[in-house]
Amino acid sequence: MASVSGIENGLDRPYNSLSENISSDDGLRTGDKIKKWVLSLFTLKFLKILIGGQVLSLLICGTAVTSQLLNPTGEGVNAPTTQSFLNYLLLAIVYCGWLVCRSQEKNFYHVFMNRWWKYLIVALIDVEANYMVVKAYHYTTLVSVQLLDSITIPVVLLLSFLLLRVRYRLNHLIGVVICLVGVPLMIWADFDAGRSHSEDAKNKVLGDILCLVGASFYGVSNVAEEYAVRHYSRVEFLGMLGLFGTFISGIQLVIFERDELTSITWDGRTIGLLVAFALCLFCLYSFFPVVIQWSSAAAVNLCILTADFYSLLFGLFLFNFVFSGIYFFSFAIIIIGVLIYGLRATKEAPRESRYNFFRNESEHPSDAGVDEISPLPTDERELTEEEREQMHKDFNRHLNGTN
């Protein structure tokens, strides 16, 4: 089985090609090959990825439903940073606490001292992505947001190509295109059901720009997350994201939403919905890197395109949405696109260059989970920090073939 990017040194978790179980025996008849190929689509590995993606879609649906219940008429709770703040706070409490309990070089102190500014940048991008996309709903139409937030997928593909050295095959490009075809079909279904009204847009240009930038930030955050969880750990990424996300969103909350907080009627229903939103988002953030480890950021973003379909199902009962058969058609199109995307594994480009945004040059390779052979000292004395750093630099130059 091949990994999603053909990684040879064990950095990436395997994303199993759905076609690699097919026998290479040229003596097989064409019918037998096709049968084997079809059966290989529905392996346990692929079903795990597909089901995991749908769980993420349901969690996204949960955040959308609770947000709609908090602000059903546009005059309810309108505090996106406050809602995100609760999620980051939960992430910080759970995963930073987990890091504190770790020992030696994987504990909170080591991670914070070596990579704090890098996670600060990622947290800033993630906080603003959440804020911009939610704010876009107040300025532009539902149709625009649904269409423009799919820009996350090409951003993830581009950054994975440039930074993670992923090389895509024809089936990946076809699968992405088919999945993206499902997006306008979903929007068409919204029109058919009367859910989209262009006259509601207050400032469409501003809303569209907010959505495009926010969705692009999501793509950056997702690729950084894929790199971090493969080279370090899910716990480290979520703990640092929660810590700095709490700090950033807390400051933003005080600056932009303090008046909104004072005007909210803090009854049991409002508090309960805020807690429900935070729990859905916390579970989404916690499970997202797990599915990324099974597959890739690109594959996960394709799977969660079905979130609008689940929102419709809940909306039929909660908001009296009108049913349209086009929703089922668009759902099927997206699933077919995911199937085609998984037919063959992606490849990895040669390692002439390295993406070291999260890695410190002075770190021992074992910090990144790389099983590399370290040169041994010729005597038994303990190396000084300067000697150890120089040894690592010389070894890295040797690996890269540079002088």
Image (cartoon, rainbow, N blue to C red):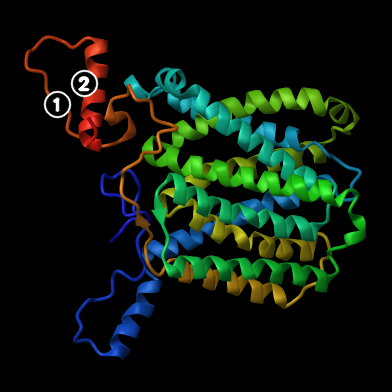
**Residue 94 seen in the figure:** no
Instruction: Please state which of residues 274 and 196 is positioned toward the viewer in this rendering.
Output: 196
For label 2, the crowd category at 10 Å Cα-Cα, with few meaning under 14, some 14 to 19 and many 20 or more, is some
The residue labelled by disc 1 is: 375
User: Does label 2 or label 1 sit earlier along the sequence?
Assistant: 1
Vertical comparison of 42 with 208: above or below = below
For label 1, the crowd category at 10 Å Cα-Cα, with few meaning under 14, some 14 to 19 and many 20 or more, is few
In the rendered image, residue 176, in percent from the top left (x then y), is placed at 54, 65
Please tell me which residue is depicted at 59% across the width and 32% down the height of the picture.
123
Marks 2 & 1, CB-CB < 8 Å contact? yes
Please tell me which residue is depicted at 83% across the width and 50% down the height of the picture.
205
Q: Secondary structure at mark 1?
A: loop
The residue labelled by disc 2 is: 391
Residue type at numbered disc 2? Met
Vertical comparison of 282 with 261: above or below = below
In the rendered image, residue 367, in percent from the top left (x then y), is placed at 32, 29
Q: Is residue 334 left or right of residue 2?
A: right
Res 265 → quadrant: top right
Please tell me which residue is depicted at 75% across the width and 45% down the height of the picture.
210
Res 253 → quadrant: top right
Instruction: Please state which of residues 249 and 141 is positioned toward the viewer in this rendering.
Output: 141
Q: Secondary structure at mark 2?
A: helix
Give the distance between the C-alpha atoms of the residues marked 2 and 1, in whole angstroms: 8 Å
What is the number of callouts on the image? 2
Q: Is residue 166 left or right of residue 128?
A: left
